[in-house]
């Protein structure tokens, strides 16, 4: 009973913030505290996070995703190279479980909690992806015909952008913004 | 007239201004007295697909160029830049085909090519185009306008005619576009399934690593010494410096070179490579023979295959004869197909596994029927060799393209030190010691940023090389890359900066299919075969007649492209042409196209964007004005880029640095492709008999296998209308190489004019009898201008030697739907009077 008393206010707060989905509107550092200290890593544009609480200009968030064993990069889904979080150190991951895909690859289901500047969050994923679309059309059609969005799989686009990004002079955020738009295209 | 025709009144008729025109009939007769020959400001700066150049303008003529000081191996092609400005076939005025001018879209389409052209004013031309676009949009919808406009003209960030055309049509009402390229159709579609990336553009292991480590280099259908003359961006030809160093290293370290090709090419010659003569389009059979030998002798790297690939077991069954066909793909089996002796096949297998071996694959092997297979099989073979990811080993599929293999400055990304490599395919990054980086350069987009109905338009695409099939079969369903699509009904096509009547296959079939179009509009500088097939032709400026900005393909430079001379005749920038068409649609449309910027403001904005990125990254750049004055800005290459090894990260940790395939590994077997159930592209690489090859029944009637590599003295068809063609042509015809034995059999001697033919058509060519081409094979470069004896007539003789008259237009398979570049032909000595070439001078034009 005592336990309930302690948890209840926390749960209420969690439910309140998690009511609407939150998405990164840009790449943003994730901090251990609600201040700009050393970062645990970087949350990547368009990734979904759960808002847990609010502290000043910071939001406490949780990102849940999948990482290959030993990887500091956490993907949004198992088997899909859609980057959600890049860790400075993988030891911060809380392991929730694991999944083996049809090719036998093992994906560790992990959770990462921390603080992010609230202005890096958006409730409108389409708007975030729309910015990627604009960039895609602006940057990727000057030297060659624009590729149809459905031309490559979500897992193929990152290496295409890796090779082409240098030619187009894409910054990391521009590249990932385009990447997320293409990977989410249906 | 000449006295009063001063510079100012001449300028009045240039550009988009309507009015009286200068009565010139060819570019050479510009009736003006120019600046003094002693011009104190004769030097300018520009760039091209052949290199960056200092332009020299005297007497108001763009007379010549000298190479940019940073060009490490200037090529003769740059001399064509000045030459083509005053070519006899410059298009001087807007022209309309006579029957089209009379009857519009209801004109007699069979007269395309043979009808006379009539000179019209710019206003008339713009009205005709805008009205026709509106008619087609209204009656048939946006898909009915084809704006795919494939081509290679212009390196400028602003004046890329293909992008500008798409932008104009997108604003006006939409269009059907295209995907893929004639160069990389099959490799680009197949390799994402195999290694999770497009291997035609994925960075290859850099030359410094090869020079230090590689012991055996195989040029497999690749000729980098020839094709690195040109680049998609501007070549700075650093690859030639590295190739020279490689040759020096070879002498010290005894590096072995092989060239696997039906033709002994420039690269083979330079490196003194051993020539493995292979029958065209049988490379997969050879690779299978090598693979089977490696497997049966237990010479292959089981460790690599197990750890880094998936699906070897399915492939193994096929290899050893345990699959459906029950045929083991032994060296003996392979030898019968590819014509290479069994002992040589075994020797190659042993060489590849005993030496640090780099397989340098070209794109020739994939421009063939079943062109999906060679690259897939080469990656499979490289996996069995087991050196993928090791310094100097493995494979690379773009050493022949745009200075491939040259270490590049990393991208300046806001903070050049913070970028981490991700996935197995990460390229070079700047390191802490070297903040050397390039900000790249952007250009005008195919889509406008301005709000309007154009923002919602969905642009339909077709695979680029299926355009004729599309015209022939509106509404027909076809398969492509795992999905089913329908060909749209195309009523109008617009081309800018391309020459489909050179790059597309099966010319006669194409001429007939083109008659299905109501209207065909072309922006061009020259009276190409394509311009001659148009209903409306608009004269465009050359790269040196307009201001622009560009960068080297290696990212080592950004270049100014400064107008060297006023445009010839009424030639107008593509940008202005499209603005004037959009004026017929409305002010919003014009604004959407220009975004309120002048051309020079656009140029400066591209530079400024790079400048801002560079500044953030701590990379120095000159302010725009100083850059424009100087002509270029240079970016250094970091030492880390000189150590790049393809797939090294993947080899180091294939779990963390997984590839973009579903399994994260190299997919020797692809469940996805197998699931498509295509007849001619299955779950693993296989040998499929091509529709035409030396072992097929067609060879009884047409016993010579024609191959059509890239030209030495052109960029595809560009520059063919300059004196540079004289460096190679035989009596004014495109050369065809044939083996002395094949020549003797037909009574053909070196220098003879010959007729090359098959069931698709006939061309004249000039015989070059040489041992450089193997028996049974003939070699004729792509890109010679099509010069029909009777223009517009199906089956007529091409007097000049357009090889695509002879090559079939049949897709590689349902997976890539790519184009082919080989065919079976017969040759005979040409009897009768040799006709004169007609293509390199302007046609007679009414109304001038």
Image (cartoon, grey):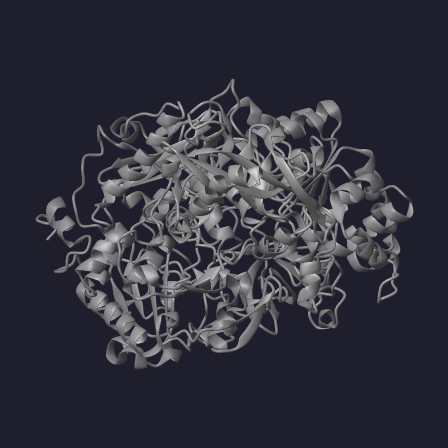
Kindly identify the residue that appears in the image at 85 percent across and 63 percent down: B323
Residue farthest along the left direction in this orientation: B4
Measured as percent of width and height from the top left, residue B828 is found at 63, 67
Q: For the view shown, which residue lies furthest in the right direction?
A: B297
Quarter-of-image position of residue B130: bottom left
Foreground pick, B370 / B722 = B370
- Left or right: residue B451 compared with residue B775: left
Give the residue displayed 49% in from the left and 71% down from the top.
B468
- Residues A60 and B552: in front is A60
Q: Nearer the viewer, residue B811 or B416?
A: B416
Looking at the image, can residue B50 be seen? no
Q: Total number of numbered labels?
A: 0
Residue at image point 23% right, 62% down:
B581
- The residue sitting at 12% across, 60% down in the picture is B19
Quadrant location of residue A96? Answer: top right
Rendered location of residue B587, percent (x, y): 17, 59
Residue A17 vs B356, above or below: the answer is below
Q: Position of residue B184 (x, y in %)?
A: 56, 53
Residue that extends furthest to the top in the rendered view of this protein: B433
Using the rendered view, name the quadrant where residue B16 is placed: bottom left
| B146 sits left or right of B829 in the view | left
Q: State whether residue A160 is above or below residue B244.
A: below
Position of residue B399 relative to residue A89, above or below, is below
Q: Quadrant of the C terminus of chain B?
A: bottom left
Residue B646 visible, this orientation: yes
Q: Position of residue B288 (x, y in %)?
A: 80, 53
């Amino acid at each position: 009973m005592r336990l309930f008393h302690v948890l209840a206010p926390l749960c209420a707060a969690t439910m309140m913030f998690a009511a609407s989905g939150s998405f990164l509107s840009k790449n943003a550092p994730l901090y251990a505290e609600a201040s700009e200290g050393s970062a645990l890593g970087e949350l990547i544009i368009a990734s979904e996070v759960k808002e847990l609480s609010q502290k000043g200009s910071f939001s406490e968030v949780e990102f849940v995703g999948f990482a290959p064993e030993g990887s500091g990069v956490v993907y949004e889904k198992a088997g899909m190279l859609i980057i959600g979080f890049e860790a400075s150190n993988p030891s911060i991951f809380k392991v929730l479980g694991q999944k083996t895909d049809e090719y036998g690859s093992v994906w560790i289901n992990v959770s990462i909690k921390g603080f992010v500047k609230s202005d890096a969050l958006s409730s409108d994923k389409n708007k975030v992806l729309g910015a990627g679309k604009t960039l895609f059309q602006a940057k990727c059609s000057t030297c060659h015909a624009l590729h149809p969005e459905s031309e490559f799989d979500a897992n193929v686009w990152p290496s295409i952008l890796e090779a082409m990004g240098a030619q187009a002079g894409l910054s990391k955020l521009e590249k990932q913004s385009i990447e997320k738009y293409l990977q989410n295209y249906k | 007239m000449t006295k009063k025709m001063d510079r100012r009144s001449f300028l009045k008729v240039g550009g988009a201004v309507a009015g009286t025109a200068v009565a010139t009939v060819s570019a050479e007769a510009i009736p003006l007295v120019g600046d003094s020959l002693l011009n104190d400001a004769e030097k300018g700066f520009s760039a091209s697909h052949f290199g960056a150049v200092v332009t020299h303008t005297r007497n108001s003529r763009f007379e010549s160029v000298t190479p940019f000081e940073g060009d490490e191996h200037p090529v003769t092609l740059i001399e064509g830049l000045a030459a083509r400005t005053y070519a006899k076939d410059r298009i001087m005025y807007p022209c309309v085909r006579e029957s089209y001018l009379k009857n519009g879209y209801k004109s007699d389409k069979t007269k395309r090519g043979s009808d006379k052209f009539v000179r019209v004013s710019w206003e008339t031309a713009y009205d005709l185009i805008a009205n026709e676009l509106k008619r087609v949009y209204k009656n048939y919808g946006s898909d009915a306008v084809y704006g795919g406009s494939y081509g290679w003209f212009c390196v400028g960030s602003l004046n890329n005619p293909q992008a500008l055309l798409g932008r104009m049509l997108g604003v006006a009402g939409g269009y059907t576009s295209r995907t893929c390229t004639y160069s990389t159709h099959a490799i680009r579609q197949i390799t994402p399934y195999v290694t999770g990336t497009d291997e035609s553009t994925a960075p290859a292991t850099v030359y410094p690593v090869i020079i230090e480590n590689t012991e055996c280099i195989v040029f497999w259908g690749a000729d980098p010494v020839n094709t690195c003359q040109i680049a998609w961006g501007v070549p700075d030809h650093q690859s030639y410096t590295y190739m020279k160093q490689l040759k020096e290293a070879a002498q010290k370290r005894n590096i072995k070179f092989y060239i696997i090709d039906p033709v002994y090419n420039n690269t083979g010659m330079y490196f003194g490579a051993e020539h493995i003569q292979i029958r065209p389009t049988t490379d997969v059979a050879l690779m299978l023979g090598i693979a089977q030998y490696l497997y049966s002798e237990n010479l292959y790297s089981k460790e690599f295959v197990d750890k880094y690939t998936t699906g070897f077991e399915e492939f193994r069954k096929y290899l050893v004869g345990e699959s459906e066909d029950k045929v083991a793909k032994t060296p003996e089996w392979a030898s019968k197909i590819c014509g290479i002796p069994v002992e040589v096949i075994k020797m190659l297998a042993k060489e590849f596994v005993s030496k640090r071996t780099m397989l340098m694959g070209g794109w020739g092997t994939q421009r063939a029927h079943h062109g999906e297979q060679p690259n897939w099989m080469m990656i499979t073979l490289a996996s069995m060799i087991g050196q993928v990811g090791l310094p100097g080993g493995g494979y690379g599929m773009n050493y022949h393209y745009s200075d491939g293999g040259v270490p590049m400055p990393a991208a300046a990304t806001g903070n050049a030190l913070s970028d981490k490599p991700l996935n197995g395919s990460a390229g070079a990054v700047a390191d802490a010691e070297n903040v050397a980086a390039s900000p790249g350069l952007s250009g005008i987009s195919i889509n406008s940023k301005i709000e309007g109905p154009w923002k919602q338009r969905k642009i339909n695409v077709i695979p680029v090389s299926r355009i004729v099939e599309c015209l022939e079969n509106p509404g027909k369903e076809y398969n492509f890359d795992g999905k089913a699509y329908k060909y749209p009904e195309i009523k109008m096509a617009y081309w800018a900066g391309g020459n489909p009547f050179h790059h597309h296959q099966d010319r006669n079939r194409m001429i007939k299919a083109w008659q299905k179009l109501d209207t065909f509009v072309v922006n061009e500088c020259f009276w190409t075969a394509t311009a001659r097939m148009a209903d409306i032709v608009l004269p465009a400026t050359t790269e040196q007649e307009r201001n622009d900005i560009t960068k080297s393909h290696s990212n080592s430079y950004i270049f100014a492209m400064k107008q060297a001379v006023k445009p010839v005749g009424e030639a107008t920038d593509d940008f202005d042409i499209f603005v004037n068409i959009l004026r017929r649609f409305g002010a919003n449309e014009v604004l959407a196209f220009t975004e309120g910027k002048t051309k020079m403001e656009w140029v400066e904005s591209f530079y400024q964007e790079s400048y801002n990125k560079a500044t953030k990254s701590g990379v120095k750049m000159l302010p725009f004005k100083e850059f424009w004055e100087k002509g270029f800005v240079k970016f250094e290459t970091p030492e880390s880029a000189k150590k790049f090894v393809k797939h090294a990260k993947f080899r180091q940790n294939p779990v963390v640095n997984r590839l973009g395939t579903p399994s994260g590994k190299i997919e020797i077997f692809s469940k996805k492709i197998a699931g498509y159930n295509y007849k001619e592209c299955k779950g693993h690489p296989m040998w499929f008999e091509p529709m035409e090859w030396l072992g097929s029944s067609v060879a009884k009637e047409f016993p010579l296998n024609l191959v059509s590599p890239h030209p030495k003295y052109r960029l595809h068809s560009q520059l063919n209308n300059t004196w540079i063609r004289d460096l190679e042509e035989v009596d004014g015809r495109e050369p065809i190489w044939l083996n002395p034995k094949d020549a003797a059999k037909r009574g053909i001697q070196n220098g003879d004019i010959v007729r090359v033919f098959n069931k698709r058509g006939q061309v004249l060519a000039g015989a070059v009898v040489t041992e450089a081409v193997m028996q049974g094979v003939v070699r004729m470069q792509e890109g010679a201008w099509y010069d029909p004896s009777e223009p517009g007539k199906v089956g007529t003789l091409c007097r000049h030697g357009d090889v695509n008259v002879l090559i079939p237009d049949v897709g590689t398979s349902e997976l890539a739907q790519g184009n082919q570049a080989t065919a079976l032909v017969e040759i005979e000595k040409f009897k009768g009077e040799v006709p004169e070439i007609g293509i390199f001078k302007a046609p007679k034009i009414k109304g001038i």
